[in-house]
Amino acid sequence: MTENIIKTDAVIIGAGPVGIFAVFELGLVDIKCHVIDILDRAGGQCTELYPEKPIYDIPGLAIVTGQELTDKLMEQIKPFGAEFHFSQRVETLERLDGGFRVTTDAGTAIEAKVVVIAAGGGSFTPKRPPLEGIEAYEGKSVFYSVRKMDTMRGRDVVIVGGGDSALDWTLNLAPIAKSLTLVHRRDEFRAAPHSVEKMRKLVAEASVRLLIGQVTTLEGEAGQLSSLVVKTAGGPERVPCNAMLPFFGLTMKLGPVADWGLNLHENLIHVDTERFESSEKGIFAIGDINWYPGKLKLILSGFHEAALMAQAAHKVVYPGKKLLFQYTTSSSSLQKKLGVK
Ligand SMILES: Cc1cc2nc3c(=O)[nH]c(=O)nc-3n(C[C@H](O)[C@H](O)[C@H](O)COP(=O)(O)OP(=O)(O)OC[C@H]3O[C@@H](n4cnc5c(N)ncnc54)[C@H](O)[C@@H]3O)c2cc1C
């Protein structure tokens, strides 16, 4: 169900490096943006797949990690006050008179004059654990992300996994859950060492229970879990559970973008190289999600595409209004938008 209807100039689907930089380029031409991402933070592939790996081919930054680049981009777009909607997947794109409406699986609806698809390799989708009947519990007592921590208050929470997400949520939810059990198949964790250390401290204090083993059975009724059976070295254990959070990693899938009636080239959105517009006026596609002859899936290509897209989007948002070409170094009007004193 739709909870909010937001009206804005541009909606950007995807908060990867290219989606973030699009906020900057659109901001320079007075276009206000809302940005949506299925992940719970900005950065796309940079923060999800290689936050600590160095990138060597960002112009002007001889070496920068995926996380650092994201942080710098987020700093750079601050003057434009874009609003981010995280942990939400854009499901539908409808055509309206003079614009579009996108709707997310969390019920947010945004109406905008232009849509910028910066969806990269597609939406990151959680991997489903191979447990019989799990689909019936999804969204009711099995969750792949936590939108509001308070929904876990007073519940018997079981977190499954050994990576950063599993450990982060163990630490965050331990104080508010009625009970918290962390289940992992071995007593070694891929998560950041300081998180593992904190988790072990909570286990030693008996605030968290750590079970080494594998969930084999879900027990419950009408989508509500009541317990899980975990196979451990000492035999099966029944664990009370009314909220299970499996963190088995993410895969990238094109997802709903494929159903929006746009011309595709091998699952990528076919764009022109002047405006980076799709087969539909007002819907642009930049970054890894687009295709044109000679396309290189590089961050710097996405940045260039964002600049040209913004010029074209200006024509849609402000029809008939002339756009002067200006440099940020010398234009006082651009500097005012950037908050330069
Ligand atoms: C290991 C690795 C190393 C790399 N090294 C380099 C390098 O050195 N230099 C370089 O230039 N490039 C490098 N790349 C490639 C670079 O990361 C990508 O080109 C870049 O991330 C593309 O940015 P993007 O914003 O287009 O897409 P992405 O970073 O993929 O971000 C897209 C975002 O859109 C979201 N999304 C998609 N669909 C939806 C939807 N329906 N609803 C909500 N959200 C949605 C996704 O969740 C994602 O967060 C590397 C990639 C990998 C995997």
Image (cartoon, rainbow, N blue to C red):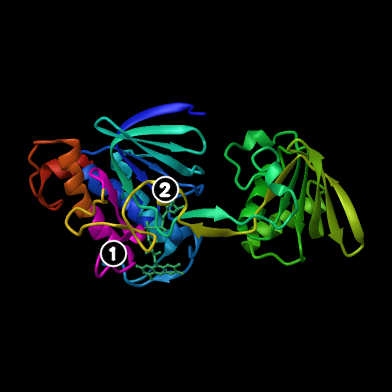
Disc 2 is placed on an element classified as helix
Disc 1 is placed on an element classified as helix
Identify residue type, mark 2: Asp
Identify residue type, mark 1: Leu
Compared to residue 120, the image places residue 219 above or below, namely above
Question: Which residue is at the front of the view, 125 or 310?
Answer: 125
Question: Which residue is at the front of the view, 150 or 95?
Answer: 95
Q: Which residue is mark 1?
A: 300
Q: Position of residue 273 (x, y in %)?
A: 20, 59
Image position of 288 (left or right of 139): left
Numbered range of the magenta stretch: 280-306
Queried whether the magenta region covers residue 301, the answer comes back as yes
Task: Report if residue 198 is visible in the image.
Answer: yes
Queried whether the magenta region covers residue 261, the answer comes back as no
Location of residue 138 (image quadrant)? top right
Location of residue 150 (image quadrant)? top right
Task: Report if residue 336 is visible in the image.
Answer: no
Image position of 162 (left or right of 187): left
Compared to residue 192, the image places residue 76 above or below, namely above
Q: Quadrant of ligand 1?
A: bottom left
Question: Which residue is at the front of the view, 6 or 42?
Answer: 6
Q: Position of residue 264 (x, y in %)?
A: 34, 57
- Residue at screen point 27% across, 58% down: 303
Q: Position of residue 86 (x, y in %)?
A: 48, 43
Q: Which mark is residue 141?
A: none
Q: Which residue is mark 2?
A: 259
Q: Is mark 1 within 8 Å of ligand 1?
A: yes
- Residue at screen point 20% across, 38% down: 30
Image position of 229 (left or right of 44): right
